[in-house]
Image: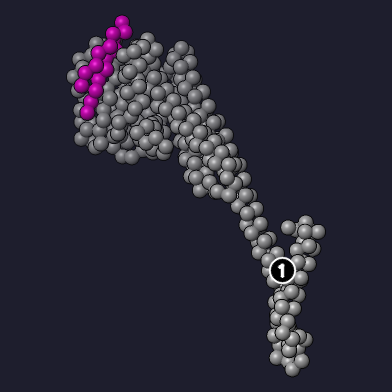
């Protein structure tokens, strides 16, 4: 599927399906061609006279799980990881490939990308924010891709607050597994932001942007830094919550072991008494008495009570 948006110099915008609108565009217009392709066959719609580099076209076909920036003689090629917002809780991304040259922006992806829809809506609602040049359109695309990570990070922060509230309300429950899974997701996001930060840095240092255009890309770079900093903070908070959970688990285990040790100690004199009175000797105290059994039981209970009083005096229980 191919969708084309034509942005004229006077700000007028036209949208159409297919590639024909792009091939007949005026020289001073900016063209955005969005291609949804799952194989090399889907890229065949791109005109050969656009002279996209074969290596860049190859990257559009093979899975690319890392952000990339490459300058070729006729164009710049960028790969970003865009969030799949159809999955609410999990960090599921798809590769967004972008070809850029003066007057032309081509986006290629193998799954629907909601950030692109946001840019289309922005063009319809407030086209002046996007402008008329290819660099401004590229900024709008990258900005939309990066900004979609922030709501996911906020949802994770809410999830962490809920986990901490549950653990605080009932100290006997364990949320350690959920904290480990959440921390892993945040770490993946943080690692994902690092190469995308590098892409923005190389765009800014490429010398292709005017000072006014560079201002917009520096703003996107600030967004990436904010997401990275928030993710790093969330990782630390998750780590702290995990440590608290581990200490609580250790404390519960220590309490259980303590009570078992106390019970075992209380049973020890009873075992000694019953063992002594059960020996096979001819003369056992109270062996012939009708109250001998109850005397033995009383002696056992008295020894246990004495130990309980001693434990309480030592504040062990």
For the residue pair 22 and 156, the one nearer the viewer reads as 156
Name the residue that disc number 1 marks: 266
Whole-percent x, y for residue 47 in the image = 21, 25
Whole-percent x, y for residue 248 in the image = 62, 49
* Residue, far bottom: 282
Whole-percent x, y for residue 299 in the image = 76, 75
Identify the secondary structure beneath mark 1: helix
* Residue, far top: 10
Left/right of residue 263 with respect to residue 99 in the rendered view = right
Q: Residue placed at 37% from the left, 10% from the top?
A: 128
Residue range of the region highlighted in magenta in the rendering: 1-17
Principal secondary structure, stretch drawn in magenta = strand
Whole-percent x, y for residue 185 in the image = 47, 40
Residue 13: say if magenta. Answer: yes
For the residue pair 78 and 262, the one nearer the viewer reads as 262
Q: Residue placed at 76% from the left, 70% from the top?
A: 302
Examine the rendering and report whether any part of residue 204 can be seen: no
For the residue pair 98 and 95, the one nearer the viewer reads as 95
> Would you place residue 145 above or below residue 238 in this image?
above
Give residue 271's quadrant in the image.
Answer: bottom right
Examine the rendering and report whether any part of residue 229 can be seen: yes
Left/right of residue 58 with respect to residue 310 in the rendered view = left
Tally of numbered discs? 1
For the residue pair 130 and 201, the one nearer the viewer reads as 130
Residue 211: say if magenta. Answer: no
> Would you place residue 164 above or below residue 136 in this image?
below
| Quadrant in which the C terminus is drawn | bottom right
> Would you place residue 219 above or below residue 55 in this image?
above
């Amino acid at each position: 599927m191919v969708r084309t948006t034509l942005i004229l110099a006077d700000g007028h915008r036209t949208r159409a399906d297919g590639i024909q609108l792009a091939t007949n565009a005026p020289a001073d217009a900016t063209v955005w061609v969005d291609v949804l392709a799952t194989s090399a066959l889907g890229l065949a719609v791109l005109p050969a006279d656009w002279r996209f580099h074969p290596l860049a076209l190859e990257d559009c076909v093979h899975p690319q799980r890392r952000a990339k920036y490459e300058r070729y003689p006729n164009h710049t090629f960028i790969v970003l990881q865009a969030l799949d917002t159809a999955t609410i809780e999990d960090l599921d991304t798809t590769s967004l490939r972008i070809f850029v040259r003066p007057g032309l922006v081509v986006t290629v992806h193998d799954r629907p990308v909601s950030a692109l829809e946001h840019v289309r809506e922005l063009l319809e609602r407030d086209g002046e924010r996007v402008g008329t040049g290819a660099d401004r359109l590229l900024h709008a695309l990258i900005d939309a891709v990066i900004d979609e990570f922030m709501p996911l990070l906020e949802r994770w922060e809410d999830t962490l607050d809920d986990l901490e509230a549950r653990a605080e309300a009932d100290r006997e429950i364990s949320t350690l597994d959920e904290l480990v899974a959440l921390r892993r997701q945040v770490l993946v996001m943080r690692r994902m932001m690092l190469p995308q930060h590098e892409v923005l840095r190389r765009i800014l240092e490429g010398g292709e942007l005017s000072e006014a255009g560079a201002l917009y890309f520096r703003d996107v770079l600030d967004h990436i830094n904010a997401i990275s900093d928030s993710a790093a903070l969330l990782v630390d908070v998750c780590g702290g919550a995990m440590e608290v959970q581990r200490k609580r688990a250790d404390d519960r285990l220590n309490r259980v072991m303590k009570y078992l040790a106390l019970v075992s100690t209380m049973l020890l004199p009873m075992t000694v008494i019953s063992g002594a009175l059960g020996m096979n000797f001819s003369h056992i105290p109270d062996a012939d008495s009708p109250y001998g059994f109850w005397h033995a039981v009383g002696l056992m209970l008295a020894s246990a009570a004495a130990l309980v009083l001693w434990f309480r005096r030592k504040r062990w229980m």
